Amino acid sequence: MLNFTVGPVMASDEICRIGAEQVPYFRTDEFSKIMKENETLVKKFSGAEEAGRVVFLTGSGTAAMEAAVINTLTKDDKVLVVNGGGFGQRFVDLCEIHKIPYTEIRLEKGKKLTEQDLYVHNHKDFTAFVVNVHETSTGVYYDMNIISEFCKNNDLFLIVDAISSFLADPFDMKALGVDVMIAGSQKALACPPGVSFVVLSDKALRRIDSNEPSCLYLNLKVALKDGERGQTPFTPAVGILRQINARLREIEKNGGVEHEISKIQLLAKNFRERILELPFVFFSESMSNAMTALHPTTASAYDIFITLKDEYNIWICPNGGELKDCVCRVGHIGNLTLEDNDRLIDALKDMRGRGII
Ligand SMILES: *Cc1c(COP(=O)(O)O)cnc(C)c1O
């Protein structure tokens, strides 16, 4: 299988090897040491402030989104939520369920966020801003600089879901004034799904300390306390956390987050140059290095996904709902190479030769 989806993605042989090992007991100094190192490296790679903390949760990315909302926001907040697709809608749903007052900035699918979209909300009584920096469902990558400036000018608490962008695009929590950054195991970290995490600023820690979340499993106050000694309140996905440790150390050894980003950027650039020779156009106005959303001009996007999977053993990401026939997505994260790009482009050329696209 050659996997160009956006998660789960291709893992390296080393990560697969660790996945085949026995899972050790975890109330030990050895496991605490791994957790502390995971926290240190994630802080470094996200540009967290010195006083910041990281909490690893056992649950997919949505668990960390929910944890961020219920632990740092309250009914007294007034939240601006960017909703440009499926993942923005998820934050809207979370605010609904947990009765957090919010206003949506609704964007047409595929369109970027503009200064105009923000400035109509300038100097209102908002207290927080919530955004998925890369709206993975449509492939739109929002400009964090204009968001950061807007939030600083309006003194807004800033929550950023960077799940599909972390390690693929430059991101500096401290410089951008981000209070909560959310990421997960199965995107550019290229580990199995099942672990997500929140990186917290000092301001976020103070909010958590003064809140009482209505959830036992996602209570960050308790998780932070246990995290001080490298432990978790409940049995975590021990095996995946060991894989995450190996992966973070590998990134550090290879030259850090900048090197990882440039590798992904190279794959994305190579693919984007070559795909335009085929009957596709880009769907999104502004792209993350992590993924290219494509609109095929001669065939159904869903049929292309099925043919690639069933006849070429190459997996790309289909879209659901109204975009099903109109958009498919190609990821550039995970253990991929330029030769893998060749295979995908060759398969698409073959499909063109057969009159499928
Ligand atoms: C993948 C992803 C998530 C997490 O989804 P899960 O299925 O819960 O892991 C959240 N937000 C974005 C932007 C994503 O790309």
Image (spheres, helix red, strand yellow):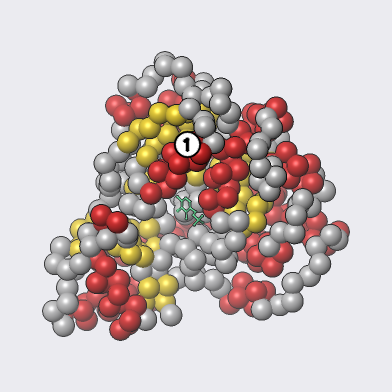
Local crowd at mark 1 within 10 Å, few (<14), some, or many (≥20)?
Answer: few
Q: Which quarter of the figure has residue 114?
A: top left
**Which x, y percent locates residue 11?**
54, 71
Q: Is residue 214 left or right of residue 262?
A: right
The answer to which of 37 and 269 lies nearer the viewer is 37
Q: Position of residue 39 (x, y in %)?
A: 69, 50
In the visual, does 217 lie left or right of 311?
right
Query: Which secondary structure lies at badge 1?
Result: helix
The image quadrant where one finds the N terminus is bottom left
Residue displayed at 42% across by 15% down: 123
Side of 122 where 182 appears, left or right: right
Q: Given the image, on which type of amino acid does mark 1 rest?
A: Glu
Residue 311, image x, y percentages: 30, 84
Which residue is nearer to you in this view: 261 or 6? 6
Residue at x-position 58% and y-position 47%:
64
Q: Position of residue 280 (x, y in %)?
A: 20, 63
Residue 17 position by quadrant: bottom right
Nearest to the observer: residue 273 or residue 208:
208
In the image, is 252 to the left or to the right of 280? right
Q: Is residue 243 above or below residue 86?
A: below
**In this view of the protein, which residue sits in the foreground, 140 or 85?**
85
Asked whether residue 48 is in view, the answer is no
Name the quadrant of the C terminus.
bottom left
CB at disc 1 and ligand 1 closer than 8 Å: no
Dot 1 corresponds to which residue?
96
Q: Residue at x 53, y 62 (%)?
A: 186
* 96 w.r.t. 305: above or below: above
